[in-house]
């Protein structure tokens, strides 16, 4: 059967990413490593099937857009402004240090100073995808460290948007205008270096103003309207259209990067109560495309560079891993941040990614960057991404913070920071509860909150397992003890003291995860009564098979309550009862 390159890359990319990702998981290393290896396997430098690199890059770009949209959804303008005092100088100093180091290496390699400048800039900017994935894996996005890191990243992105516009102008100024290599960014008018810079800044400001004035009104209005149509499909489509549409408008009209455009779209939505739902709607697609990002990076890797230029490659890596980290660490310490926060920020930024590739590509196409520099950037990127989980593991090992440096120590409570890195056993930081005779509630959403409040009102001891920051905050407000994490993770569930618990309520809607929780709970304490939530007969059967002692099907209970309403002679009556015809 005939198939095009798009189908080939989706099937080979996602399929192999799954296989290698699962393998990585088995070996207890980050699945990102598996995705990169999948990319190397379908890349042009290894034998066998070769996927279309250009297509891969475009699919990866969609991943970046959806990811930044998701971050924007959990990030308010307030968050962004609250970290500006450290993120702006931090990012600028780090960019300056990395650029100078890059220029130094360029000088030693005998490149021109402009080549060194572009090379250094490419080494100075961290990858959005890598940073967000590692923060998400460790549930750090909503913590102080996470907010600083994301704010820092936004500043870097803005700086790179400017750099992308400036470089063609610099190249022109140096080489004289060369027809045929005019970058799409330079306008037809000869504005000069400062003119181009001013014009770009104006466009960025115009975009932000446009989003705050127009976007802020129009986007929530569209989503509210769609939500009221009651069609989930339309709603999902609307979210996707907004994220991609704003990113595209940002790039096409305002010359802002896709990533920044999507970030602002998400941030605008975070002000409306629908945002949480919107985030969930874009989640599965986002994850699939983020995987394609790593596959596309893997495709760029030419292992031969390891033999061709080992010395320069080591120096490049040293700039990314050591030079940048040291700069970030020093700045954070200078601002009075604890060693743990400083090390986490340094580790999260000690890698390079998509912006570096774009800069390198631009530099080579303008003939101001030697091809070898681009190869070093690509190899530096993939190696630094591969090593990033290792850095985090080291940070977790060495960043022993004094208790006073932690925000709010609570007895028996598990704070998400510093959360466990994937390569290590996941239970390093999960503090087992000391409760006994307690009730365990998994999931503190629509069902869990009502249940938990009722249990607390009866004077029961309550332990809640939850992973969403908002739900965690609600449980904390209600006075429950908390375990933060995925209850389907054996280490998390094991910390809930099931052997001493009185009852377990599995109040999450996903039956696969719920089944896994029931199975393990039953193994841990075969005598424990387990009450689980279900939505269909098939789910009831599944959960019962997994060990639930009692399964409540939500829909059946709703029907029962509705029926009771009609039968009870003195119960509350509906406004107008349907009359039999
Ligand atoms: P609701 O459907 O409104 O009752 O919400 C379900 C809640 O369960 C949400 O707050 C989710 O964050 C939470 N949840 C879902 N799956 C898990 C899980 N595997 N571990 C912990 N919490 C979960």
Image: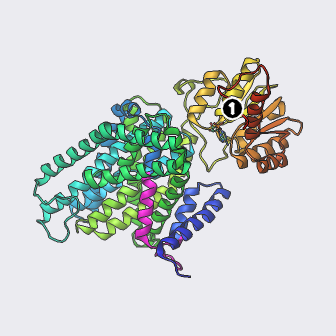
Instruction: Tell me what residue is drawn at x 13 percent, y 66 percent.
Output: 175
- Residue 501, given in percent of the width and then of the height, sits at 81, 30
Within the displayed image, which quadrant is ligand 1 positioned in? Answer: top right
> Residue 58 lies in what quarter of the image?
bottom left
- Residue 268, given in percent of the width and then of the height, sits at 39, 38
Which residue bears the numbered disc 1? 448
Instruction: Tell me what residue is drawn at x 21 percent, y 54 percent.
Output: 166
Q: Is residue 86 something that shows in the picture?
A: yes
> Residue 526 lies in what quarter of the image?
top right
Q: Secondary structure at mark 1?
A: helix
> Residue 106 lies in what quarter of the image?
bottom left
Q: Is residue 308 left or right of residue 481?
A: left
Instruction: Tell me what residue is drawn at x 63 percent, y 27 percent.
Output: 475
Is residue 233 one of those drawn in magenta? no
Above or below, comparing residue 580 to residue 289 in the picture: above
For the residue with label 1, is its CB less than 8 Å from the closest atom of ligand 1?
yes
Q: Quadrant of the C terminus?
A: top right
The foreground one among 571 and 457 is 571
The foreground one among 326 and 569 is 569
Residue neighbourhood size for the residue with mark 1, other residues' Cα within 10 Å, grouped as few (<14), some (14–19), many (≥20): many
Q: Quadrant of the N terminus?
A: bottom right
Taking the view exactly as shown, the residue that stands out farthest to the front is 581
Taking the view exactly as shown, the residue that stands out farthest to the right is 527
Q: Which residues are magenta?
A: 41-65
- Residue 314, given in percent of the width and then of the height, sits at 42, 61
The main secondary structure of the magenta stretch is helix
- Residue 190, given in percent of the width and then of the height, sits at 10, 57
């Amino acid at each position: 059967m005939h198939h095009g390159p798009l189908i080939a890359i989706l099937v080979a990319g996602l399929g192999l990413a799954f296989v290698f990702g699962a393998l990585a998981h088995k070996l207890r290393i980050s699945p990102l490593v598996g995705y990169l290896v999948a990319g190397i396997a379908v890349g042009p430098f290894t034998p066998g099937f070769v996927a279309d690199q250009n297509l891969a890059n475009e699919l990866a770009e969609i991943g970046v857009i959806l990811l930044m949209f998701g971050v924007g959804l959990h990030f308010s303008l307030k968050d962004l402004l609250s970290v500006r005092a450290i993120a702006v100088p931090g990012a600028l100093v780090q960019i300056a240090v990395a650029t100078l180091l890059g220029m130094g290496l360029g000088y030693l390699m005998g490149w021109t100073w402009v080549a060194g400048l572009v090379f250094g800039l490419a080494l100075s900017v961290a990858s959005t995808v890598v940073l967000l994935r590692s923060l998400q894996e460790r549930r750090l996005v909503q913590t102080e460290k996470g907010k600083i890191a994301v704010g820092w990243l936004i500043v870097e992105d803005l700086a790179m948007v400017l750099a992308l516009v400036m470089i063609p102008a610099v190249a022109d100024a140096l080489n004289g205008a060369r027809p045929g290599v005019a970058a799409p960014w330079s306008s037809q008018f000869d504005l000069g270096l400062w003119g181009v810079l001013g014009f770009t800044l104006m466009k960025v400001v115009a975009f932000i103003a446009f989003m705050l004035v127009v976007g802020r009104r129009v986007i929530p209005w569209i989503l509210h309207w769609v939500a009221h149509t009651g069609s989930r499909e339309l709603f999902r489509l609307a979210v996707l259209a907004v994220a991609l549409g704003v990113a595209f408008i940002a790039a096409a009209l305002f010359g802002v990067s896709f990533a920044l455009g999507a970030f602002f779209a998400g941030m605008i939505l975070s002000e409306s109560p629908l945002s949480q739902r919107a985030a969930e709607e874009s989640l599965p697609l986002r994850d699939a495309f983020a995987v394609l990002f790593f596959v596309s990076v893997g495709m760029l890797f030419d292992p031969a560079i390891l033999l061709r230029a080992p010395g320069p490659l080591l120096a490049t890596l040293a700039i990314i891993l050591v030079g940048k980290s040291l700069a970030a660490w020093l700045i954070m310490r200078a601002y009075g941040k604890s060693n743990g926060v400083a090390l986490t920020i340094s580790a999260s930024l000690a890698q390079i990614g998509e912006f570096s590739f774009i800069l390198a590509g631009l530099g080579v196409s303008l003939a101001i960057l030697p091809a070898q520099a681009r190869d070093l950037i690509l190899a530096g990127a993939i190696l630094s991404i591969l090593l990033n989980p290792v850095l985090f593991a080291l940070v977790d090992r060495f960043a022993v913070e004094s208790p006073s440096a932690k925000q709010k120590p609570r007895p028996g409570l598990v704070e998400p920071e510093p959360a466990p890195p994937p390569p290590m056993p996941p239970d390093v930081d999960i503090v087992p509860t000391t409760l006994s005779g307690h009730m365990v509630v998994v999931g503190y959403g629509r069902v869990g909150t009502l249940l938990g409040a009722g249990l607390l009102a009866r004077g029961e001891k309550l332990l809640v397992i939850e992973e969403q920051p908002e739900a965690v905050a609600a449980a904390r407000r209600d006075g429950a003890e908390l375990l933060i994490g995925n209850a389907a993770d054996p280490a998390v569930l094991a910390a809930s003291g099931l052997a001493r618990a009185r009852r377990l309520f599995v109040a999450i809607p996903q039956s696969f995860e719920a089944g896994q929780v029931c199975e393990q709970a039953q193994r841990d304490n075969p005598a424990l009564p387990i009450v689980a939530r279900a939505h269909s007969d098939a789910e009831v059967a599944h959960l019962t098979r997994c060990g639930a002692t009692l399964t409540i099907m939500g829909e059946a209970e709703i029907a029962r309550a509705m029926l009771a309403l009609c039968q009870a002679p003195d119960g509350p009556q509906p406004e107008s009862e349907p009359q039999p015809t």
